[in-house]
Amino acid sequence: MTHYARPKIVQLFHTCLVNEVDPGVGLAVVRILERLGIVVEVPLGQTCCGQPAHNAGFQADAVAVARHTLRVLDATEGPIVVPSGSCADMLVHQYELLFHADPEWRAKAHAVGERCRELSQFLVEVLPGAELGARLASRIAYHPSCHLMRGLGVRDQPKALLRAVEGVELLEVRDEEECCGFGGLFSVKHPEISGRMLDSKVACIEASGADRLVSCDLGCLLHLTGGLHRRGSRLKVQHLAQVLDEGLA
Amino acid sequence: MIPPFPERARVALGNHNLHVALDRATAQLGSRRGAAFASLPDADSVRDIARRAKMATLRDLAGHLQRFEERLEANGVHVHWAETGEDANRIVVEIAARCGVKRAVKAKSMASEETHLNAALERSGVTVVETDLGEYVVQLAHDRPSHIILPIIHMTREDVGRLMHERIGVPYSDEPRTLAGYARTKLREEFLRADMGISGANFGVAEDGTICLVTNEGNGRMVTTLPRVHVVLMGIEKLVPTLADLDLFLRILARSATGQKLTTYTTLIRGPRRPGDECGPDQVHVVLLDNGRSRILAGDTAEILGCIRCGACLNACPVYKSIGGHAYGDTYPGPVGAVVTPGLKGLADWKDLPSASSLCGACRDVCPVRLDIPRMLLSLRHSASRQWASPLGLRAGMKAFGWVAARPRLYRAVTLLARWSLRRLADDGWLKRAPGLASGWTQSRDLRAPAEATFQELWRRGRSR
């Protein structure tokens, strides 16, 4: 894995879900980064990356949001940290697809995409050994989100960060690379199919014997926590940033 | 008229037997595939080279087809062009009539499933017998295949045992070996009696007109050599430029499909029986089927024509594993079917298929020629959203989303209102039943209520302290 010099300043693209549903994730990211001596800036004009429209096939609407996001991020400097694999994949790969016939915006998308790092990817790049010095006694089941794993190719980084936490036992989850069935609009448009995928996933997670479920994507986590709650499970569900932050407290 | 997709999916989801059968088979195929690729040196670059060869062939498909036709004719093969499935069926029926064919045996062919060739032949008085074991069982059951490679993946061996007992009067057994033995005895008679053999083609080699067929049961060899007439029905996209390319594709096809390094039989056909040959048909006909393929080639999903029909994407797809092949409603199921079917038959009646995916990308990961199926599904969703207004609420919602999310202040106001209303509906931080579009969500999971204060608000408060 390539390591980079630790930047002085990063931009946080906090994502709409963190902003609206679980702001604690954003605060945890800020605390982790500040502990590393990095100044965190939050471009306040950001809204959503536009993925809901893009994935539903509403390209023009996705383009409108993508243009806005690119304007906001292009006006900033330094690495852009994104605590979500799927939003990062949207910024890194999908924007260039959206603008494939528009060289000016495609160039802008490319420049911004080059600066984007999903949180675990960023942490491992600037932290040789993935050592944050955190401690936490927990048996953790990790769910790799599809866009993080297959879109961005980030497979080992979150696990390395979790393994480096003293006291954490990272458990094997059967069929861990299987999708949880979220898929944005898919989960409301085809709830039965999505629900069956969720059932299989929840069964594998519960069978792992974990006391916590961790992932790098709030979308998957909302889906999984909703599924676990409906099925009466009270397993603790957290974003990677929250686990690391808790271990550093 | 078949029932709509959500209904077909619901039926499949309620079929416990189907899930037992699917879980057994797909898990095994998935792990076999992994092991088989581990035995291929430099697998990733073999896949890259294969992809480039396929894409290059598709870019000049007309040129390759012309060369292929010339070579076939030079080899003594009769070449026919079929623009539609009906054309293909008519051509085969005419060949059968001209040659006085009463009985035909068939090796596995997805193209003939696509055109419903069996029904057309039966109508003209020709008896057709499927000779691939799985397809034979499908025919006995008056069923349809539910997987490209394993036509009866949806059946358990107990199902097959009962079916054979009922339809061909053999003693019940659930021993695969015994069941295969029953079929073998029956099929031997058919091979020897048939006047015509019908097969598909896994590949056609443009440089020398070779037809390549890969099988595991040997039936392909019988079908193509014993009857006096052999008809090949193949899609126009099945070409590879050279024998060297064929070698490349053979290395990845069986590995992807069944986890074998090579299938048991790899049959290369160059034409009819030559003077002095001990066996082989007197006539070989190749029917080249378009049936919508040119339309796909001209569009945004042309890449899908590079598919070598290995079925790996089906075995990897969590949606396929949940609903099986029949729910897809047509010949080609799974991720590849979700792109191919709307392409061949038009998006209007098939727009549910591209929407029924979480875009997890497992298909792209396992595809031996690295087809970007999620990208193509997105492209089809885009075409669907442009052409059809329904559901109207969704369209209006997305328009509003695009407008609002590009205006941060308005966005903050709108999301504040949304958060406030959802929080009012929540009980102890959770919604058990959500309104509107979100009601689909709460059908199978609870919805966590949004936060009272956003991250940006908390962040600003923190900074001002």
Image: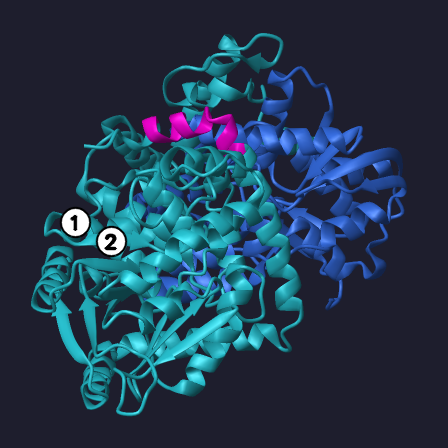
Asked if labels 1 and 2 touch by Cβ distance under 8 angstroms, the answer is yes
Q: In this view, does A239 lie to the left or right of B419?
A: right
Q: Are marks 2 and 1 on the same chain?
A: yes
- Dot 2 crowding, Cα within 10 Å, few <14, some 14–19, many 20+: many
Q: State which chain is coloured cyan.
A: B
- Shade of chain A as shown in the rendered figure: blue
- Mark 2, residue position: B128
Which percent across, then down, holds residue B107? 34, 61
Asked whether A53 or B353 is in front, the reply is B353
* First-in-chain label (2 vs 1): 1
Q: Is mark 1 on a helix, strand or loop?
A: helix
Residue at 70%, 41% (x, y): give it. A174
Task: Give the residue number, with chain letter if any, for mark 1.
Answer: B122
Q: Is residue B368 visible?
A: yes
Query: Few, some or many C-alpha atoms within 10 Å of disc 1 (few <14, some 14-19, many ≥20)?
Result: some
Q: Which amino acid does label 2 sit on?
A: Val
The magenta region covers B7-19
Q: Is residue B373 magenta?
A: no
Magenta stretch encompasses residue B12: yes
| Position of residue A143 in the picture relative to residue B98 (left or right) | right
- Which quarter of the image is occupied by the C terminus of chain A? top right
Q: Disc 2 sits on a residue from what chain?
A: B
Placement of B240 over or under B302, stated as above or below: below
Give left or right: position of B161 versus B382. Answer: right
Q: Mark 2 to mark 1: distance in Å? A: 7 Å
Q: Residue at x 29, y 53 (%)?
A: B129
- The correct choice, above or below, for A154 with respect to A211 in the image is below
Q: Picture coordinates of residue B186 (x, y %)?
A: 39, 52
